[in-house]
Amino acid sequence: MRQIVGNHNILFVTLDTLRYDVAHQELKSGNTPHLASFIGGSWEERHSPGSFTYAAHTSFFAGFLPTPSKPQYTKAERLWAARFAGSETSGPHTFVFEAADLVTGLKLTGYNTMCIGGVGFFNRQTALSRQLPFLFDASYWNPTLGVTAQDSAANQFSLAHQLLKASSPRQLQFLFINVSAIHQPNYFYINTLTSSPQPCDTLDSHAAALRYVDSQWPALCAAMDSRPEPWMYVVCSDHGTTYGEDGYFGHRLAHPAVWTVPYAEGIWTSTR
């Protein structure tokens, strides 16, 4: 990351609430071909530092991304980190920033920083939901990008294209997108449930929401194509959620379905 920062645009996408088991199975079954191609064919199983959106993202921006699930790799060198005495996971390749969060650290390095919000913690409607978006030079949210919009991913990626195309070609960009489609409610991604008098989210509608996001992924690639520089990317979930496993429903709780998340990082090569 020390070589990448200053030479690459950076894309950070959180697929909010996506479970690792669903992401892995959908990719293995060939149901998410665009994501499979983008991330190089497989998700890495990791553990999130938070069981809900705010906790996880506050950790992410401080430098604590999901950690590898295998014990021998839990102290692997981090991509980025705030300077912190005694850190055991900062190393020679870590981008260490002189700020409390990555966004400010990248600003100090010359990046333009943009946030396309999704779930409620990014909607800028309360003091709490302004805290994360207002770290950025510019942040965007409206109901068409949120959890109740069935076409939220299409709208988010279209906005990304507009913003990147309009941005200065001489300034590196840090683009963060919190994809909201997989977060509840997601029942409307299964057509047979939309006419139910009491529609409910299920593991099947969770997977259907992921397939919808995958169908829109080429639009995000097109947005990245609008920039002349290469991209470094991180794509992951912030936490999973439960649908009745062991009697649990939802998240903000300690359960493997919540803390086990999919993760991918790499350098993206333009399709042009």
Image (cartoon, helix red, strand yellow):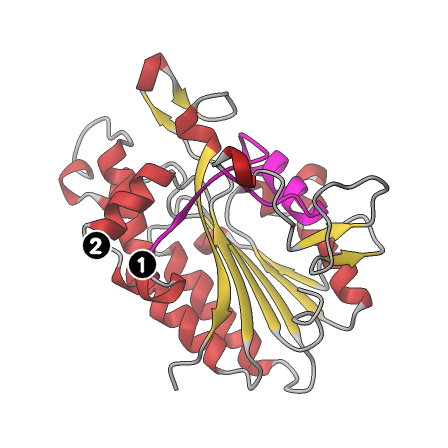
Q: Is residue 143 left or right of residue 203?
A: right
Residue 153 lies, in percent from the top left, at: 39, 58
Check if residue 193 falls in the magenta segment: no
**Where residue 141 is drawn, which disc sits there?**
none
Label located before the other in sequence (2 or 1): 2
> Foreground residue, 53 or 256?
256
Q: Residue at x 50, y 83 (%)?
A: 226
Q: Is residue 116 left or right of residue 97?
A: left
Q: Residue at x 20, y 43 (%)?
A: 190
For mark 2, what is the residue? 31
Question: Can residue 125 be spotted in the picture?
Answer: no
Q: Is there a contact, CB below 8 Å, between mark 2 and mark 1?
A: yes
For mark 1, what is the residue? 214
Determine whether the residue tagged by mark 2 lies in a helix, strand or loop: loop
As shown in the figure, which amino acid type bears the numbered disc 2?
A: Asn
Q: Residue at x 70, y 57 (%)?
A: 94
Q: Is residue 102 left or right of residue 141?
A: right
Give the magenta part as a residue range.
41-68
Gap between marks 2 and 1, in whole Å? 8 Å
| Viewport quadrant of the C terminus | bottom left
> Foreground residue, 52 or 33?
33
Relative to residue 52, is residue 270 depicted above or below?
below
Check if residue 44 falls in the magenta segment: yes
